[in-house]
Amino acid sequence: MVRARFGTFSIVAYERETQTWGIAVQSKFLSVGAVVPVAEAGAGALATQALANTRYGPDGLSLLRRGRRAADVVRELTEADPGRDERQLGIVDSKGEAAAFTGRKCMDWAGHEVGDGFTCQGNILFGPAVVRAMARAYESTGGDILDRLLAALSAGQREGGDRRGMQSAALVAVRAQGGYGGGNDRWVDVRVDDHPTPIEELKRIFHLYDMTMLNREDPATLVRITGDVARGLQHDLGILGYYTGRFTGTWDAASEAAFHRFIGEHNFENRERDDGQVWPSIVEYLRERAAAEVDRRSRTAPIVPHALDRGPGAGAPAGGGRSPSAAKKPPATE
């Protein structure tokens, strides 16, 4: 029986400043995010690939929870595994120390590069330039761990990546109470299971995830909801049917209620504020949605005076929705 192997390149990393562990991975393999990345806040993170041994995930985390160093965990997992020659493994422990293993029977090209707080590894690659480029990109890219992980993934693909092509990708990051509502440590968990350009699709989906689920914007960019900002929000909320008042620029109770409803229906509740300020990305998102609605109605709505001043949820004019041509005609005289 021929056992399936899948070519993969991944990076496992730790950001000390925020105590965040993350993994980014791409492969010519369906749903790579369901197999390769494993992480737990406070313990560490790992990637198991090549002829992946999925026991490395729970067994590795069990060792990492006990404070074992990455190099020791790699050694214990692989020495106990009779199939180790066909395995590949990268680990970053609770302190950010990294270690990796590439079995001597992994399909060429296969190898890894370990750096300060991260490890890059891959198999069935175009060559060593793939993991080398990933490492350099992670070291030199600005931003937080997520920006750097995605940059590393793109750099690896630019050097050829998996020599059989592309299919799936994933980005996982954990930090204490980082999940939705603080209920778990799953800060980021985004996957592309099957796509011709999975890294670019991963970036697209992550942008939406970042805008709604995370809060990575600089607080210095917050804007106060007054004057033209308030007037613009009232206008856009009105176009979308959330607000029915006048565009006065005064942020009153009706405006706040309309904005709160919009926030909830568009999944921005993690980023709602109660200090009279708003994130610029939410302002821009609302503006784009309102512009799209105006464009849609400009092309499809009937020509009715002031129709574009009413949102999609506005009530129909008095007299019902029938057009004049549909009204009942008086009986003809004989």
Image: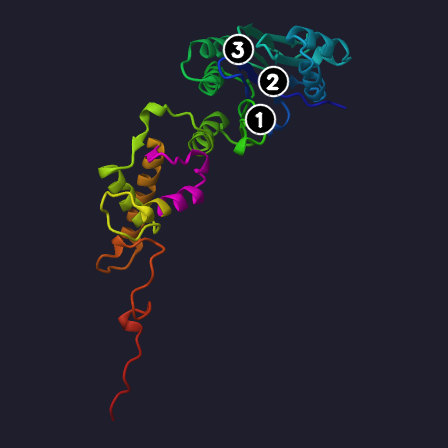
Q: Is residue 292 magenta?
A: no
Labelled pair 1, 2 in contact (Cβ < 8 Å): yes
Secondary-structure class at tag 2: loop
Q: What is the quadrant of residue 40 in the picture?
A: top right
Q: Which of 104 and 239 is in front in this view?
A: 239
Q: Which of marks 1 and 2 is nearer the N terminus?
A: 2
Crowding near the residue tagged with mark 3, few <14, some 14–19, many ≥20 C-alpha atoms within 10 Å: many
Q: Which of 308 and 160 is in front in this view?
A: 308
Q: How far apart are marks 3 and 2 (CA)?
A: 26 Å
Q: Which residue lies furthest to the bottom in this view?
A: 334
On the image, the x and y values in percent for residue 312 come to: 35, 54
Residue at 50 percent across and 28 percent down: it is: 198
Decide: is 215 above or below 320: above
Number of numbered markers: 3
* Amino acid at dot 2: Gly
295 to 136, vertically: above or below: below
Find residue 268 and name its label: none
The residue identified by callout 1 is 185
The residues bearing labels 1 and 2 have C-alpha atoms spaced at a distance of 9 Å
Label 2: which residue? 42
Which is more foreground, mark 3 or mark 2?
2
Image coordinates for residue 290, horizontal then vertical, percent: 31, 44
Circle 1 sits in a helix, a strand or a loop, which is it?
Answer: loop
Residue at numbered disc 3: 131
Residue 297 at x, y = what percent?
Answer: 30, 52
Is residue 273 shown to the viewer in this render?
Answer: yes
Residue 68: x %, y % from top left: 68, 9
Name the amino acid, label 3. Answer: Val
- Spatial distance from mark 3 to mark 1, Cα to Cα? 28 Å
Residue stretch in magenta: 258-278
The secondary element bearing badge 3 is classed as: helix
Using the rendered image of the protein, determine whether residue 167 is visible from the camera's viewpoint.
no
